[in-house]
Amino acid sequence: MTRRFALMIDPLASDETREDYADTFTQVDAAAPALSVGELSTQRGDGVFESIGVVGGHAQEVVPHLERLAHSARLCDLPVPNQAQWRQAVERAAEQCGSGESVIKLILSRGVEHGPTPTAWVTAAPAADFTAPRRDGIRVVTLDRGYDLGAAERAPWLLLGAKTLSYAVNMAALREAHRRGADDAIFLSSDGFVLEAPTASLILRFGDRFVTPAPNGGILHGTTQLSVYDHLAARGFEAGYDRIPASDLTGADAAWLVSSVRLAAPITAIDGVELPVDAALTADLNEYLLSPRD
């Protein structure tokens, strides 16, 4: 079983190259003090992060996660992470993960106010048991995200396309979903289009065509969704992107929320309207997602 630990990183410039970055890592007990009280990640949520699923000690889709971390850093005017350094940190963390499922988190913060910047670290911990939602599915509700589909382009300072540490809204949405008797939520734009879930991407099936909301309008391009699309394409299915009106949701032949750690969870109902579940395809998707993937 994975023990919880953290690896502090002395971040290097993005263009600095070495064969070994071990001297830039400091492993610490995850329960021990490690951050300054002036740390802006905790004071303001001023930073970016990624969560990487680990299966049997193999970190999944490391490069896409690192690329998205870099994209988020650029949007937030943070120093772009050194890809080779962070990849070696992930590899070192994965080596200490056990035989089951784990999760590695990458955190890049603006650092200490009026002090050193940035602060960077990775953590590793056992993943929760998601057997039930993968097998039995989840019920979701739709929630208004509060902005229209053009807000990200019109107001880039909202950082709608960055995976920031400011997750208070996402967690509030999950609590609201639970208050409504559901397991998760799907955000809608204020002009009536489907966005994403608070911590997952949405994939809908209409016949033999699979569709997910186009990665604009503040939608993160999901690493797991991209991997699922590769798998579906290899099986001969059509998989694409589109603007999806909210009214189309309950007309889907099947739907899933997909993410790096929970993997593929079939949606059984949206706003109380039952949805068909393709149990065989769901099992196939999760078998694929549990296989080693780079």
Image (tube, rainbow, N blue to C red):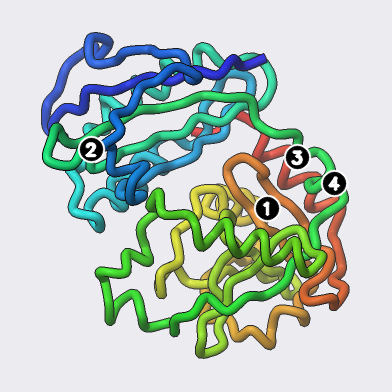
In the rendered view, tell whether residue 55 sits above or below residue 214: above
The residue under the point 58% across, 72% down is 187
Give whichever of 38, 178 is nearer the camera.
Answer: 38
**Callout 1 crowding tier (Cα within 10 Å): few <14, some 14–19, many ≥20:** few
Foreground tag (3 vs 1): 3
Q: Total of numbered circles in the picture?
A: 4
Left or right, 100 with reference to 226:
right
Q: Which residue is mark 3?
A: 130
Q: Against 32, is 274 above or below?
A: below
Determine contact: label 4, label 3, CB under 8 Å. Answer: no
Mark number displayed over residue 111:
2
Distance in Å between CA atoms under marks 1 and 2: 45 Å
- Closer to the chain start, of discs 4 and 1, is 4
Q: Nearer the viewer, residue 121 or 81?
A: 121
Q: Amino acid at mark 4?
A: Arg
Q: Residue at x 38, y 52 (%)?
A: 164
- Which class describes the residues within 10 Å of circle 2: few (<14), some (14-19), or many (20+)? many
Q: Is residue 125 above or below residue 227?
A: above
Cα distance in 3D space between marks 4 and 3: 9 Å
- The residue where tag 1 is placed is 235
Residue at the spot 41% in from the left edge and 69% down from the top edge: 218
**Mark 4 — residue?**
135
Instruction: Say which element carries label 4.
Output: helix
